[in-house]
Amino acid sequence: TVEVYDSEFVGHLVTGRDIAISGQLRYAGEGVLDLHDADYRFSEIGWQAGGRQLAINDLRITGGVQQSLKGDTPFPALDANISIAATEFTDSDAGMAVTLADVRLEPVSLSQLNEQLTRDLGGRLQVGRSDIEQGALSLGWQAIDARLGGQVGRDMLRFASDLGLTALRVAHPQLGVQPLAVDAIKITGLTQAAQTRFDVLRVEGLELPSDPAETGLKVASIELGQGSYDDAAGVDLDSIVIDGLQSAVIRDQAGQWRYVTSKPASVEALPVAAEPAPAASGDAGLPWRVGSIRITGESYLSVSDRLNPDAISPRFRIEKFDIGTIASASPDADTPFDIVLRPDEYSEFEFKGETRPLSE
């Protein structure tokens, strides 16, 4: 048991308070150290270097570890439970502050070595109410729950997970005076190795308030199907399906057309960042492809003119909205579209054909 621990080395300050360690360590033969019935408790752990600070409160690690001394793998066999009541990290140079509550890896495991000299990862990660701020951006969530899997080895790290996040809030001046709110984000089949992939990414209950209130955006769900990313191939999405979209476009009494994230003409313009330097010849930026875009369900777009109160204010039901493949690598390829809007049950507007939205 250690009540106070303070150490400073080459500009790094490490502190600890109320540290209690217990367990049984033995040599298990064949170059293996075995630690079992371990119980590590840290009331406070701190680290500081320059403008960066890390504070961890109430860290507890229980379980067992087996580590080979032969150098065949840097990762031990592990069967443990890890919990942290609160974590705070700040970086004054980057203007960043991170607060995490109730972090739990219960359990987390690394199997014995298999024939490929890798270990199977398993476990469950849970994170409670947390907040991240950097500059003008702030985001927070109520809870994260992730099932962990994958393999780790000397020359291999493959991560797999099904992940859920609830009550996300994102605030930034470009989003308006009120934050973007999302009820839940669910990702299934997430894997990360040389390429990051997922089977389905689903966003539920998205709401972005705006002014006027009618121009706010509400979406019941957005589902991205079969997505992947790597540095060479870029971003590839098989499909985007938007369900239950509702918003409006309004011309206000000043004659300005207002929509979600738009600002009234009276608002002083924000400083505009300098234009980035042109891309080098042959560098077209990150490539991307979207296989299809659809809008379904009870989706509506309203249009009104407050400058002319006698004008008809239609509320278009988006009966059909299908867009074909769009890819940055094929700007001159034809993209089919099929759009049907209904202002009432007796009328409809249909737009169908092909376009080249990326062609110069």
Image (cartoon, helix red, strand yellow):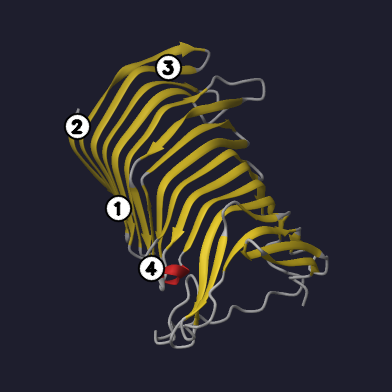
Residue type of the residue flagged with mark 1: Gln
Specify whether residue 309 is in view. Answer: yes
275 shown above or below 197: below
Q: Amino acid at mark 2?
A: Val
Q: Label 2, label 3: how many angstroms apart (C-alpha)?
A: 23 Å
Labels 2 and 1: the sequence-earlier one? 2
Residue located beneath label 4 in the image: 136
Q: Which residue in the protein does label 2 denote?
A: 2
Nearer to the camera, 95 or 273: 273
Say if mark 4 contacts mark 1, CB within 8 Å: no
Asked if marks 2 and 3 touch (Cβ < 8 Å), the reply is: no
Going by the numbered disc 4, the residue's amino acid type is Ala
Q: Which residue, given by chain and number where applicable, does mark 1 sit on? A: 48
Q: Quadrant of the C terminus?
A: bottom right
Secondary structure of residue under mark 4: loop
Give the secondary structure at mark 1.
strand
* Mark with earlier residue (4, 1): 1
Of 198 and 335, nearer the camera is 335
Q: Residue furthest top?
A: 29
Crowding near pointer 2: few (<14 within 10 Å), some, many (20+)? Answer: few
Q: Residue at x 45, y 71 (%)?
A: 174
Asked whether the beta carbons under mark 3 and mark 4 sit within 8 Å of each other, the answer is: no
Q: Amino acid at mark 3?
A: Asp
**Sequence-wise, which precedes: disc 3 or disc 1?**
3
Is disc 3 placed on a helix, strand or loop? strand
The numbered disc on residue 34 is 3
Mark 3 or 4, which is nearer the eye? 4
Mark 2, secondary structure of its residue: strand
